Amino acid sequence: MIRRLVDFALENRLLVVAAALLLFAWGAVSFHQLPVEAYPDVANNYVEIITQWPGISAEQIEQQVTIPLEVAMNGIPGVEHLRSFSLFGLSDLKLIFDDTEENAWNRERVLERLGQVTLPPGVTPQMGTLLLHPAEHESAVRRHGVEIARRLGGGEEFQGRP
């Protein structure tokens, strides 16, 4: 089989060269028609829930805010990962969705679940903005929590939950 193919290619050199040139031209045209984005969006679809409760320890935040929010968010379709951490006066949940759904639809699902959560009086969860990359936003929130603790001088131990 291979011997016959090689023999055919050697006997019909002009046809093989023409086919190669045709494939090369087709590839060059296809390459120039590829859509190119200057700044492609490579970040995951995510929704972040930030809840502030000033003056409350990380342990109380975790027990009374973070865990109830985690329980309420479990089972949302399309969630690949749920990450959370609790700091002094601050709870942060990040739901990372698969890439098949639009972020607006994901935010709507999270809003529905937020309406079903019972939290302590005066505590209102808010969804984070989509302006920053997730890693930048998380580090900004952590820095904010550390700065609040430093100003208050509470000596509070910071505990994060992976």
Image (cartoon, rainbow, N blue to C red):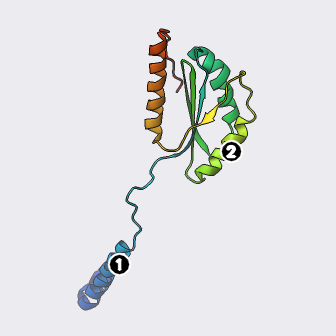
Disc number placed over residue 162 in the picture, else none: none
Compared with 92, 60 (above or below) is above
Q: Position of residue 151 (x, y in %)?
A: 46, 14
Q: Looking at the picture, tell me which residue is in the foreground, 79 or 54.
A: 54
- Amino acid carrying mark 2 in the image: Arg
Q: Position of residue 58 (x, y in %)?
A: 56, 17
Q: CA distance from mark 1 to mark 2?
A: 43 Å
Which residue is depicted at the point 37% across and 59% down? 38
Horizontal relation, residue 60 to residue 2: left or right: right
Q: Which image quarter: residue 86? A: top right
Compared with 115, 108 (above or below) is below
Horizontal relation, residue 34 to residue 124: left or right: left
Label 1 neighbourhood size at 10 Å, few (<14), some (14-19), many (20+)?
few
Label 2 neighbourhood size at 10 Å, few (<14), some (14-19), many (20+)?
some
Circle nearer the N terminus (1, 2): 1
Compared with 70, 37 (above or below) is below
Element carrying mark 2: helix
Q: Position of residue 114 (x, y in %)?
A: 70, 35
Disc number placed over residue 109 in the picture, else none: 2
Element carrying mark 1: helix
Which residue is depicted at the point 35% across and 80% down? 26
- Amino acid carrying mark 1 in the image: Val
Q: Looking at the picture, tell me which residue is in the foreground, 160 or 30.
A: 160
Q: Which residue is mark 1?
A: 29
Q: Which image quarter: residue 18? A: bottom left
